[in-house]
Image (tube, rainbow, N blue to C red):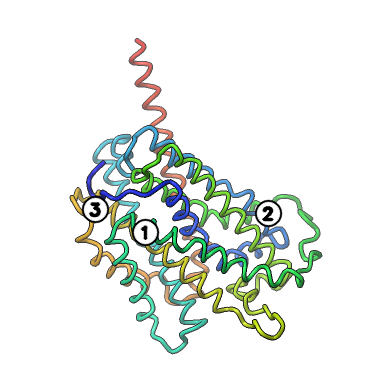
Amino acid sequence: MSMVESGKISASQAGKLLYLTVIPTAILTSPAMIFKVAKQDLWISPILAWSGLITVFIALRLHRMFPGENIIQAGERIIGKFLGKMVGLIFPLFYLYLNGIVVREYGEFVVGALLVNTPLIVVLGSMVLVCAIVVRGGIEIVGRFAELFLPAFITLFLLIIVPILPDLNISNMLPVMGEGIAPSLAGTFVLQLWFSEFITYSFILPFVTDQKNAAKSIMFALGAVILTLVVSNLATLLLLGGLTGDYAYPFLILARYINLAEFFTHLESLFMAIWVLGAFVKICAFFYVTVLSAAQWMNLSDYKPIVYPLGFLLILVSLWVAPNYQEMTRAISTSVNLSIFTVFVAIPVLLFGLACVKKAVHKNKNRR
């Protein structure tokens, strides 16, 4: 393993980091996107999301075949130096692009829902600057932030779900699978977008100290993501019913709906806290992978010198990704979904397939 990074994190920190990398943007926009295709079965879609299992399986298996190496380094060993470099370049560029979308989503949401008069560039720039400082601290700092924020994240999440329980209307979810399993499966294709992000584990695995718990912790994180999405989708559906697809952020409406004894009302600030904490960890994780993989690709001995230049580039990309929020949401559910599937699922599956073929050929040669 190249000494680009010398930090270490525990398997449980890695699991928490992955959970907070996937979930914040998923609970923000996925209910409305899934509702358009799966209607009242939108809560079944997360249970059927298979790309999470595929990416987790490949990240773990590739790491077992090439210990201490991430998917880019393993790729060079599987398909040779030149081709490996070509494929390896896709990852930092794609993570930069994807993170640009996340940063823009964060900025649009904060400006639209809270800081209406603040220029977008100020919101984006300040977030990226804070994340750049954290990323320069290394994987240990990113892992600690995830560990610190997770209890707060779950508490805030429950503070939104629990008060609305008496108002939930079970009849909104009926008939279950009225049109068969097809709508729920269509919803899982939307969720591809988030579940395939589990391939990020491939870049974190080499720094996990207790490797024997790595598989357990990531499977736990995957299960937790599925559970959280089922709960948030169900709560949204049972409260809003057929209106779920009409809102850009249905889960935010849940927070606005809360009214406890005329005292606790309009708790959207709770939701803002969830979103800011979660988005912060997600942007840090993606930024870290971008910087690390770019440094490895360029054979640098240290990634720190390129953190701020790439941070500046990230701000530019977040402004370039789309002219406005509507265009961006449309892109997310169409072209971005397809490109994520290609880079995070198809390429790793191909690399893993080739690695298995190579291994089998090598075994046969040795037998002879």
346 with respect to 284 (left or right): right
Mark 2, residue position = 44
Q: CA distance from mark 1 to mark 2?
A: 32 Å
Mark 3 vs mark 1: in front: 1
Nearer the observer: mark 1 or 2; the answer is 1
Please name the residue that numbered disc 1 is placed on.
142
CA gap, disc 3 to disc 1?
Answer: 18 Å
Of residues 368 and 25, the one nearer the viewer is 25
Amino acid carrying mark 2 in the image: Ile
Of labels 3 and 1, earlier in sequence is 1
**What's under tag 1, amino acid-wise?**
Val
Whether residue 29 is visible: no
* Left or right side of 319 for 113: right
Q: Amino acid at mark 3?
A: Ala
Provide the secondary structure element on which disc 2 rests.
loop
Contact between marks 3 and 1 (CB within 8 A): the answer is no
SS label for mark 1:
helix
Q: Position of residue 114 (x, y in %)?
A: 50, 83
SS for callout 3: helix
Locate residue 80: give its quadrant. top left
Q: Is residue 80 above or below residue 200?
A: above
- Is residue 100 in view from this perspective? yes
Where does label 3 land, which residue?
Answer: 295
- On the image, which quarter does residue 61 sit in? top left
| Position above or below: 235 against 88 | below
| Mark 3 crowd level (few <14, some 14–19, many ≥20, 10 Å Cα) | many
In this rendering, the answer to whether 347 lies above or below 307 is: above
Say whether disc 2 or disc 3 marks the residue closer to the N-terminus. Answer: 2
Q: Earlier in the sequence, mark 1 or mark 2?
A: 2
Residue under the point 50% across and 82% down:
112
Specify the farthest residue to the bottom: 117
